[in-house]
Amino acid sequence: MIKVFDLADVSLHNNRKDCWVIINARVYDVTKFLNDHPGGDNVLLDVAGKNASEEFEEAGHGSAARLMLDEYYVGEADLLTPSCGTSTTTNPKAETHPKQHTIMEENMQSRLGFMMTSVGLLAILGGVVGFMLYK
């Protein structure tokens, strides 16, 4: 079961002791990462309890940062429903709003693309190493 939070839910987690952010329609509890964030904790505290997708993308985070997000994942963000301050648990097979489905699909395609690129680069590197050893 996937936990779904609306904006009001996430907005309650807006301080140093309880810091959540939304990035690309996914909710992350980054409280334990505040002291380790390379840009400093204020960068995260400035967007605590908010949708930080734009800031995350503008900062130019690489693949390592994107992979680290999985460690802090707590659920999905419902960005379309008017905030009512209550979280819900949904069945991942249940019907979702078309726009939310599109966002989730884009996230999955992005992850798949990253994985395929990584596999391709490893294959090329393996070929180069094999060629050098053969020579």
Image (cartoon, rainbow, N blue to C red):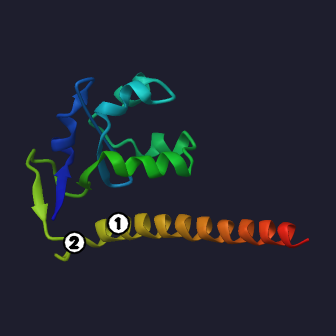
Q: Residues within 10 Å of mark 2 (few under 14, many from 20)?
A: some
Which quadrant holds residue 30? top left
Instruction: Pick whichever, 16 or 121, lies toward us.
Output: 121
Q: Is residue 86 above or below residue 39?
A: below
Residue 130 image position (x, y, % from top left): 79, 71
Mark number displayed over residue 104: 1
User: Callout 2, which amino acid?
Assistant: Thr
Mark number displayed over residue 96: 2
Q: Which residue is depicted at the point 10% across and 57% down?
A: 88
Residue extending farthest to the front is 134
Which quadrant holds residue 90? bottom left
Q: Which residue is depicted at the point 46% across and 52% down?
A: 67
Residue extending farthest to the right is 135
Position of 119 with respect to 94 (left or right) is: right
How much space separates mark 1 and mark 2, taking CA atoms? 10 Å
Q: Is residue 38 above or below residue 56?
A: above
Q: Which residue is depicted at the point 26% across and 54% down?
A: 79
Q: Is residue 69 above or below residue 111?
A: above
